[in-house]
Image: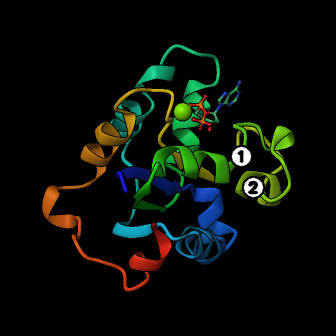
């Protein structure tokens, strides 16, 4: 399999609403492998770096305020086509447009409170950049899950 790593974060609203476990379970059960996790608070500076592509947009200040408002659960998940698969499981950016069965479609209603972040598969290298922004190499684990021989052909 072409294993790939992607950056995922339960946003402050998801943490406050008690959704960390539910969200982790969905990725675990799908077969994705957790290789890094950090329960942390995002600084203003890190928020600006992470959301740099949106700087100057009308929603930017509100987005930074929101993402720094409380702790987040930052994670790295690994698996076949992980970046795209996580985005599919997350649903559309606006929960109002997200299909039921997706994380945003099941747990969100408002664009500015959409519960989860995942690296954009359409943005080449975003997964690697975002992992580097939040994690040092020695904070990521290399190991095999016992089900891997049955998960992949
Ligand atoms: P995604 O998080 O799906 O990658 P994005 O990168 O376009 O979406 O935007 C980053 C976040 O900014 C998004 O999760 C919610 C917020 N956001 C995006 N567009 C917005 C808008 N028009 N009004 C308010 N918030 C917005
Ligand atoms: Mg994005």
Farthest residue to the left: give it. 138
In the rendered image, the vertical position of residue 61 relative to residue 138, given as above or below? above
Residue 127 x %, y %: 37, 41
Q: Which residue is mark 2?
A: 102
Indicate the quadrant of ligand 1 in the picture: top right
Q: Nearer the viewer, residue 20 or 32?
A: 32
Residue 91 x %, y %: 71, 46
Packing grade of label 2 (10 A; few <14, some 14-19, many >=20) is: some
Q: Quadrant of the C terminus?
A: bottom left
In the rendered structure, the answer to whether residue 114 lies left or right of residue 31 reads: right
Residue at 25% x, 76% y: name it: 143
* C-beta proximity under 8 Å, tags 1 and 2: yes
Q: Nearer the viewer, residue 111 or 5?
A: 5
Residue 135 x %, y %: 25, 55
Q: Which residue is mark 1?
A: 91
In the rendered structure, the answer to whether residue 21 lies left or right of residue 5 reads: right
């Amino acid at each position: 399999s072409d294993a790939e790593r992607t950056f995922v974060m339960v946003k402050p609203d998801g943490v406050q609403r008690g959704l960390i476990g539910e969200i982790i379970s969905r990725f675990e059960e799908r077969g994705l492998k957790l290789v890094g996790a950090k329960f942390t608070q995002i600084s203003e500076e890190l928020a600006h770096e992470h959301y740099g592509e949106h700087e100057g947009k009308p929603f930017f200040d509100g987005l930074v305020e929101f993402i720094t408002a409380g702790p987040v659960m930052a994670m790295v998940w690994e698996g076949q086509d992980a970046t795209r698969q996580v985005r599919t499981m997350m649903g559309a950016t606006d929960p109002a447009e997200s299909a039921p069965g997706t994380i945003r479609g099941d747990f969100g209603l408002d664009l500015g409170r959409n519960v989860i972040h995942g690296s954009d598969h359409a943005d080449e290298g975003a997964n690697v950049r975002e992992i580097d922004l939040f994690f040092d190499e020695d904070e990521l684990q290399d190991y095999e899950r016992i089900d891997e021989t049955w998960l992949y052909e």
